[in-house]
Amino acid sequence: MTGEGQGHAPVLCDEVLEAFAERFPGRFLDATFGGGGHSRALLEGDPANRVVALDRDPAASPRAEALQAAFPERFSFHDMNFAGLEQLEEADFSGVLFDFGVSSFHFDEAGRGFSFREDAPLDMRMNPREGRPAWHFLESADHRELVRVVREYGEEPRWRKIVAAIEAARGGSRLRRTLSFAELVETAVGGRRPQERIHPATRTFQGVRIAVNAELEAIETALPAAFAKLAGGGRLAAISFHSLEDRIVKRFFRRMAGKAEHAGDHRPEQLRARRARLLTRRPIEAGEAERRRNPRSRSAKLRILEKEAA
């Protein structure tokens, strides 16, 4: 998710508006409020549009209050994780938007521990009021869990060396802070190779963050809940930033459209129920102008699903 203002730009905003425009005026759910860029664009897209927004990060609440002041009759905000979307009382939305991943605000606020550009406690929690910080996870996770986080969530090919280094560092101070942990990973893999475009710790940081915030589990829970809250003919839009997120979205969308979810899905046609229509056979990606303006958009993929009319 991305924000707006102070260099924070909502990713694929024009494409999201185009996806929802046929449902204007309507009521929309922004399940990943962030900086409010998408919510504001929807509210300004039609004077009769209404938006309900969610975010589990307590730092999002002041940004939501500013939007509430600007659109007092048409905007409301819930301080909650979209994993609990089923508990939301509102329903019959014209469209639901997810902008997965980490907000630009998280990376820019060094004290949150999402980035190793500056030294900070290794926390990484999107909601610091709950769960355990990343350093505590690294100190206590068993071997199998560490392997899953670094190899699968981080998609790191040198996972064996990194997992061994984490386990060897337990009980000391190297897992407690962003810079020392990044240095530990870099040392474990033998330093940065000349051809490497990213820091050697980038993928491991991604994997740990995903685990600490249970990001993939939240997506798997939220997508069917969001679909259930769509009105007939409503649209579900999801922006993903890496293959693990996109795979979950793609398979769910194909399942709702009555199609094979993956190459190994050989269920006969009569066992598949079509409840929606795929509006994107291939994900929509940012154009060159947006990529230059907002480098984070380079990895964004937007998929859109339309629920069948009741």
Image (cartoon, rainbow, N blue to C red):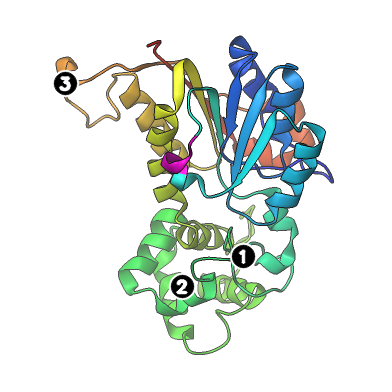
**Badge 1: residue crowd in 10 Å (few <14, some 14–19, many ≥20):** some
Residue in view at x 29 percent, y 16 percent: 274
Front residue of 45/12: it is: 45
Q: Which comes before the other along the chain, label 1 or label 2? A: 2
Front residue of 67/212: it is: 67
Residue in view at x 61 percent, y 65 percent: 192
Res 279 seen here? no
Q: CA distance from mark 1 to mark 2?
A: 26 Å
Q: Which residues are magenta?
A: 85-89
Q: Main secondary structure of the magenta part?
A: helix
Return the x and y of residue 14 as percentages of the image width and height: 70, 22
The answer to whether mark 1 and mark 2 are in CB contact below 8 A is: no
Q: Which residue is mark 1?
A: 192
Q: Which residue is mark 2?
A: 137
Residue 215 within the magenta-colored segment of the rendering = no
Number of numbered labels in the structure image = 3
Under mark 1, the amino acid is: Arg
Question: The residue tagged with tag 1: helix, strand or loop?
Answer: loop
Under mark 3, the amino acid is: Leu
